[in-house]
Amino acid sequence: QKEVEQDPGPLSVPEGAIVSLNCTYSNSAFQYFMWYRQYSRKGPELLMYTYSSGNKEDGRFTAQVDKSSKYISLFIRDSQPSDSATYLCAMSAGNNRKLIWGLGTSLAVNP
Amino acid sequence: NAGVTQTPKFQVLKTGQSMTLQCAQDMNHNSMYWYRQDPGMGLRLIYYSASEGTTDKGEVPNGYNVSRLNKREFSLRLESAAPSQTSVYFCASSGGQANIQYFGAGTRLSVL
């Protein structure tokens, strides 16, 4: 079993939809949780970062961490065609330990 | 502010040829990483350097070598390229407790 599981999709939604992207993990030591966005033929870029449990909001994006269920989510409200990308979750236990990556979910937002 | 710069952006090699991928960061980060990304396989860590003067193997190190030249630069060398090394290679750097990584634009490598 991989330490981080992420459904690769692809996920296709109409413009304006609410999108939910998820990852599950098995290592209870993880404390730092990140979402990266990767456009086609580009490098991953940090979208959101959360420490421990709880929610974090940034514009149309909300990141949630549920440590009791070992489950993290990224919600995109009012999705736009420009949100079409691959979204990767990543997490670490801190203390400069390596990031553990999900496989990424491919999202297409159709006009 | 350039962030993480990788060269070259594209490269085609013949089997058995060698090459070095270059990476430089200007964020004063201690840690640097080399990943490869293949369809359906996600990002896989090849080598990393936690600090200047140290390097360690990741999950797929075979066929590669690295050099941490100084705090800014971390190079990846393929001594004898194989078709299985056809991939997109990303360099990243990080600093701080959370290990948030910042990526370069990638090098697309084809080995024929």
Image (spheres, coloured by chain):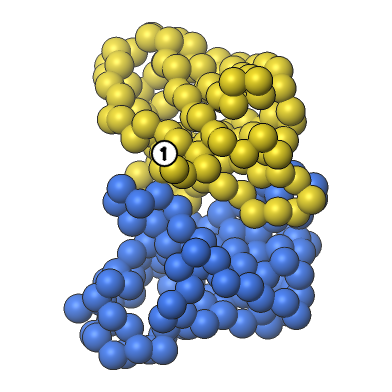
Q: Which residue is drawn at 34% across and 35% down?
A: A8
Furthest residue toward left: B112
Q: Residue at x 70, y 39 (%)?
A: A29
- Label 1's element? loop
Q: Residue A52: x percent and y percent?
A: 74, 28
Q: Residue A23: x percent and y percent?
A: 49, 29
On screen, residue B55 above or below A100:
below
Q: Which residue is drawn at 53% across and 58% down?
A: B104
Image colour for chain B is: blue
- How many marks on residues? 1
Q: Name the residue under label 1.
A: A104
In terms of depth relative to the viewer, which is nearer, A89 or B60? B60
| The quadrant where residue B92 appears | bottom right
Q: Which residue is drawn at 30% across and 24% down?
A: A11
| The quadrant where residue B16 appears | bottom left
Asked if residue B25 can be seen in this view, the reply is: no
| The quadrant where residue B37 appears | bottom left
Q: Residue B101: x percent and y percent?
A: 64, 51
Q: What residue type is labelled 1?
A: Gly
Q: Residue B66: x percent and y percent?
A: 56, 80
Chain assigned yellow: A
On screen, residue B91 above or below A43:
below
